[in-house]
Image: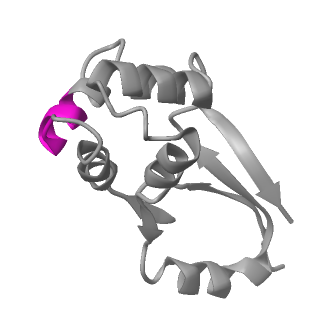
Amino acid sequence: MKRRIKAIIWDFGNILGRFDHLKACRKLARYGSSSPESIYALLFSGVGAPTKLHEAGVLSSHQFFQTVRNLLGLSKELSFREFSSIWKDIFSENEGVGTVIGAIRPNVVQCILWFKERNKRLSAWN
């Protein structure tokens, strides 16, 4: 009897897709006086780092934007919409993974996308 895979849990970060936080930091540097490396250190270092609070759901997207803008002293010309665009532009496809998914997909009952930063399932598809 042929056994069927019931579910596969896919982690997004550097599995399905790649991301480069420094790409966002370089773009944010255009709105202030800090270097991309300094911005990265301020946003990602320590337990109370704004990115960690946002990823944990402690800060909403708007609160995260305001926190980042204030912490870095960024220009008021930076709108929430532009900030969101900058923050979302860090992702790229992990070449070859789509081919793997396409090859195994007919034999899988359910696929689950997982973001471990928020420690919860984002979506599932059959």
Residue 36 on the magenta span: yes
**Residue that sits furthest to the front in the current view:** 77
**Which SS does the magenta portion mostly show?**
helix
Question: Over which residues does the magenta segment extend?
Answer: 34-41
Residue 86 on the magenta span: no
Q: Which one is in front, 109 or 42?
A: 42
Identify the residue at horizontal 43%, vertical 73% (top origin). 94
**Residue 89 locus on image (x, y percent):** 45, 60
Of the 4 image quadrants, the one containing the C terminus is bottom right
**Residue 120 locus on image (x, y percent):** 66, 34
Left of 75 or right of it: where is 77?
right
Q: Which one is in front, 33 or 122?
A: 33
Identify whether 13 is placed above or below 40: below
Q: How is the image coloured?
A: one colour
**Residue 107 locus on image (x, y percent):** 76, 78
Quadrant housing residue 100? bottom right
Quadrant housing residue 76? top left
Identify the residue at horizontal 25%, vertical 50% (top origin). 22
Identify whether 29 is placed above or below 19: above
Identify the residue at horizontal 30%, vertical 52% (top origin). 27
Q: Which one is in front, 11 or 118?
A: 118
